[in-house]
Amino acid sequence: MRDQIVARIGQLPEGQVFTAKDFLEIASRGTIDVTLADLTRSGAIRRVRRGLYDVPRVNPALGGQLSPDIDSAARAIARRQRWKIVPDGAWAANLLGLSTQVPAKIVYLTDGPSKAVLIGRRTIQFKHARPKTLAGLEGKSALVVQALRYLKKDGVGRQEIEKLRALLSAAEKRKLSRSTRFGVDWIHEIARQVEETPR
């Protein structure tokens, strides 16, 4: 059991945040807790906050560990709590590379309760949203829609459309176009342009 936990952690990319619950199908909670405590002591993993761990990313130039990956941490918290989450506004645009500005507030819309969680030196704000707001939104489609809402119609041009074309797979483009069909007209028009194959 312990070996399976260690092997799975060994396959995780640096910066990946996880919780004890992520291993419940392969070991008992007691075995998981003891194993994670041992790995934390040895420095193989890092305790980000109570119940959250990561495989720390190291910057050789700076000679130290980098801050935890905020998006990975938010998703680990959501998995543990069984929440649905969607990055909101400026943070969604930043995650997609449509904006280089790291927002002062990192906000995720959620079907769970509103809550602030400190990760390293950053605070993640989970903001309760009405089910209607999150309906039909998931994965990359949700991320794109939130980013477009933040950028607004005038802030989306050829460059942003090309970036989204390069970023999304053909299946993701189709899904984006389908999921925005009954939403805001200009967002669906952008989604349609992203789906089109440039001549």
Image (tube, rainbow, N blue to C red):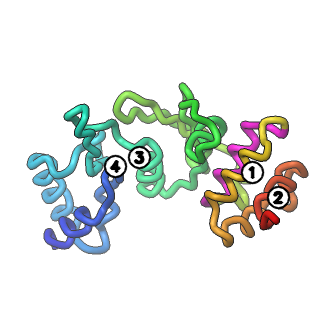
> How much space separates mark 4 and mark 1, taking CA atoms?
29 Å
Q: Is residue 163 above or below residue 155?
A: below
The disc, 2 or 4, on the residue closer to the chain's N-terminal end is 4
Whether residue 78 appears in magenta in the rendering, the answer is: no
Q: Residue furthest right?
A: 185
Q: Circle 2 is placed at which residue position?
A: 193
The disc, 1 or 3, on the residue closer to the chain's N-terminal end is 3
Q: Secondary structure at mark 1?
A: helix
Residue 21 falls left or right of residue 129: left
Q: Circle 3 is placed at which residue position?
A: 73
- The residue that appears at 37% across and 28% down in the rendered structure is 121
Q: Residue 68: x and y, percent? A: 35, 41
The disc, 3 or 4, on the residue closer to the chain's N-terminal end is 4
Residue 186 falls left or right of residue 48: right
Nearer the camera: disc 3 or disc 4: 4
What residue span does the magenta drawing correspond to?
139-153
Q: Secondary structure at mark 4?
A: loop
Tell me, yes or no, whether the two marked residues, 3 and 4, touch with CB atoms within 8 Å. no
Nearer the camera: disc 2 or disc 3: 2
